[in-house]
Image (cartoon, grey):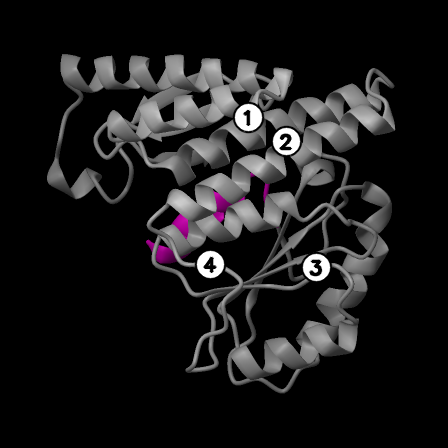
Amino acid sequence: MLRWCANCQRFQGEAAPFDDFNLTHGICPTCAPLAKRLTDGDVARIEVIKAIHGRLMEAGWRRDLATAARILEEARGAGIRSVDMLLATVTSLLYEVGEAWKRAAMTVEEEHRFTAFCDALYERIAVVSDVSDADAPFADGWTDALLMNAPGNRHTLGARILALWLTSQGAHVTVVAPDTRLDVAMALITRRQPRMVMISMALAEQRDDVVRIVERIAALAVPSPPKIVVGGYAVKLGLVAPIPGVDLSVDLPTQWSIAQA
């Protein structure tokens, strides 16, 4: 399920069951100190979000970019940030695509067309959002979170959307391109000293490579080793055995929120 705050109307991450894309609402940790209680008006706003999310999902399956763009404009008019709606919707769509791929119900060509639609939607959001480019270098050389894919995972959309959302939360983010050599990635971690390294793992078979990355990070000469969080489709399905020194997370936005609490 998709968690939203009824007060600030921001996406808060996912909760089991992950194949249920209905919205569940409450008050997020940021709004909780206000001691705010849910009102009829809060519930009504959540119903608006549910309706917009449902229509955006339908446009996504049709790969109807023009309609999706109009729906996102409507969401912005209702006070819903595009980056929140993007993360919630594309997260849901990518999960369904993974399930369709697993059932052999989607061809390679269909998967490529769908990914192209999601990429185009991301580009529109990256332009209209009040969020800086997550790939932009920072003059001070440090970063809060470094995002990278497990070797063999060439799908970058999830990491880019997560980076956009983290940046909207005020984080300095570095995204490592999939083709980056491991020694280059380690040098980047040494220079920027992120507080958190997030690794996206699409397949359970990528676990051994992730273990090697974790071992390399542990051996780096940095004053404060980063927290390492591994997520992705394989983790969400519970297919990955525990990795020493790693938090396996079905929901990376929640991990970031917990770290900031």
Chief SS of the magenta region: helix
Q: What residue lies at 42% left-to-right and 31% top-to-bottom?
A: 85
**Mark closer to the observer (4, 3):** 4
Sequence-wise, the earlier of marks 3 and 2 is 2
- Residue 237 placed where, x, y %? 71, 31
Between disc 3 and disc 1, whose residue precedes?
1
Task: Please tell me in which quadrant of the rendered image residue 121 appears.
Answer: top right
Find numbered disc 1 in the image and state the secondary structure of the residue it sits on: helix
User: How far apart, in angstroms, are the residues tagged by discs 1 and 2?
Assistant: 7 Å
Residues at marks 4 and 3 touching, judged by CB atoms closer than 8 Å: no
Element at label 2: helix
The residue tagged 4 is: 133
Q: Position of residue 109 (x, y in %)?
A: 84, 27
Find disc 3 in the rendering and name its residue.
244
Residue type of the residue flagged with mark 2:
Phe
State how far apart marks 3 and 1 are (Cα). Answer: 42 Å
Task: Quickly name the residue at label 2.
Answer: 117
Question: Mark 3: which amino acid?
Answer: Pro
Q: Which one is in front in this view, the residue at disc 3 or the one at disc 2? A: 2
The residue at which mark 1 appears reads as 65
Q: Amino acid at mark 1?
A: Leu
